[in-house]
Amino acid sequence: MTPAYESLLQQLKRLPGLGYRSAERIAMHLLVEQPEELSDLITSLEAAKSAVGRCETCGNIAESDQCAICSDERRDVTKVCVVEHVPDLIAIERSGAWKCGYHVLHGKLSPIHGVGPEKLNFKSLEQRLEAGNIAEFVLALSNDIEGQATCHYIQEELVGDRPIEVTRIGFGLPSGGGVTFADSVTLRSALESRRAYH
Amino acid sequence: MTPAYESLLQQLKRLPGLGYRSAERIAMHLLVEQPEELSDLITSLEAAKSAVGRCETCGNIAESDQCAICSDERRDVTKVCVVEHVPDLIAIERSGAWKCGYHVLHGKLSPIHGVGPEKLNFKSLEQRLEAGNIAEFVLALSNDIEGQATCHYIQEELVGDRPIEVTRIGFGLPSGGGVTFADSVTLRSALESRRAYH
């Protein structure tokens, strides 16, 4: 249509979850349907851009050097739950099942997508390890080959001989899930992680 | 999480087609996963904000007073296809089936949603009528009660006794669609708009 519109459309299409149709709908909404919302959106984006960044310790979203979790003195942040993305951290916090620290990798190892260790948030994890600030790892990474490779890398390359307890979260049937409706990979995980029944 | 993040999330959730999860995913993408994209997005939004607006004549998206269609001298813009939204116009242009002018209402009459004639782009349509610049209307509005009400309003309140040809686009089975899979409203439309078979 117009050059500025096309350029905005290209930017919107780069966002996760937006295809051509949804990007077009948002661009039209902001430019011709409800243009009064556009200024508010730009203001919010700029405020977030200047205020929000990554926690220097764990990679969580933060409005200062340390995120709210790493600076919470009631938490034992030497026990570290390793997750791929911030929404994973949010989901675990929401569950209330983990009251200690985190480390956000911002991805998982994936050689076929060109994601090597240098693209993940391993540098600050090494610093935490070298400073002796980590006593336990709980690896809460995906139940797939890439999650497996990332766990392996952490165990072999980072933990090595250090006396750190490393566990991986359990896999199996989700709450409320029946065997009939589970896919093969889930069933294999569930069978592999079977436990003695008391 | 953080105030600036929450504020951005609220803004993103107001956009059409974005729910909580998709807004969260985009906010995280822009703030912690790929923060280098955020500046580009803000630049595009601001460029579009200052460059793009509505065509004063037809309501289409435009980078000057007149859109590319209204200022195209090869088009007979006295023949006006009335649509609800700019993407409708884009879809009709893509079909190549209409080579004349348009008028974009930016919605349809919907009393239960509080959309009366004053909220639609009727003012410039009246101006076009009063200036004698309209010879024909093709109403390309939705096949529902609100689209019907909007067609009725245009015919009764705007066209009135003026010698203007008014038609409404055909409704029925879509291309490639079989009777078995059509819903009842479509089938009723298709039967009502049956034509002599030569």
Image: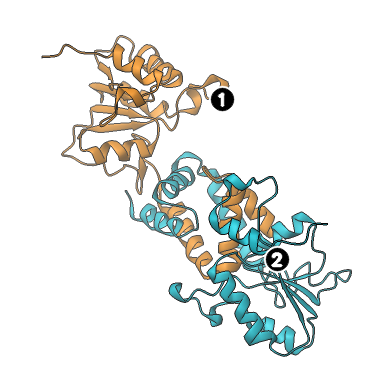
Chain colours: A orange, B cyan
Identify which residue is drawn at 55% across, 52% down. Answer: B183
What element does badge 1 sit on?
Answer: helix
Q: What residue type is labelled 2?
A: Ile
Q: Position of residue A59 (x, y in %)?
A: 38, 36
> Does residue B112 appear in the picture of this structure?
yes
Q: What is the chain identity of the residue bearing mark 1?
A: A
Q: What is the chain identity of the residue bearing mark 2?
A: B
Q: Dividing the image into 4 quarters, which one contains the C terminus of chain A?
A: top left
Q: Position of residue A167 (x, y in %)?
A: 27, 18
Circle 2 crowding by C-alpha within 10 Å: few under 14, some 14–19, many from 20: few
Identify which residue is drawn at 52% across, 43% down. Answer: A17
In terms of image quadrants, where is residue B192? Answer: bottom right
Q: Nearer the viewer, mark 1 or mark 2?
A: 2
Q: Determine if marks 1 and 2 fall on one subunit.
A: no
Q: Does B183 sit above or below residue A118?
A: below
What is the distance, in whole Å, between disc 1 and disc 2 at their CAs?
Answer: 48 Å
For this view, does B63 lie left or right of residue B21?
Answer: right
Q: Which amino acid does label 1 sit on?
A: His
Q: Where is residue A108 in the image (x, y as percent from the top left)?
A: 45, 26
Q: Does A64 sit above or below residue B44?
A: above
Identify which residue is drawn at 40% across, 46% down. Answer: B21
What element does badge 2 sit on?
Answer: loop
* Foreground residue among A180 and A68: A180
The image's mark for residue B169 is 2
The residue wearing badge 1 is A113
Q: Which residue lies furthest to the right in this view?
A: B74
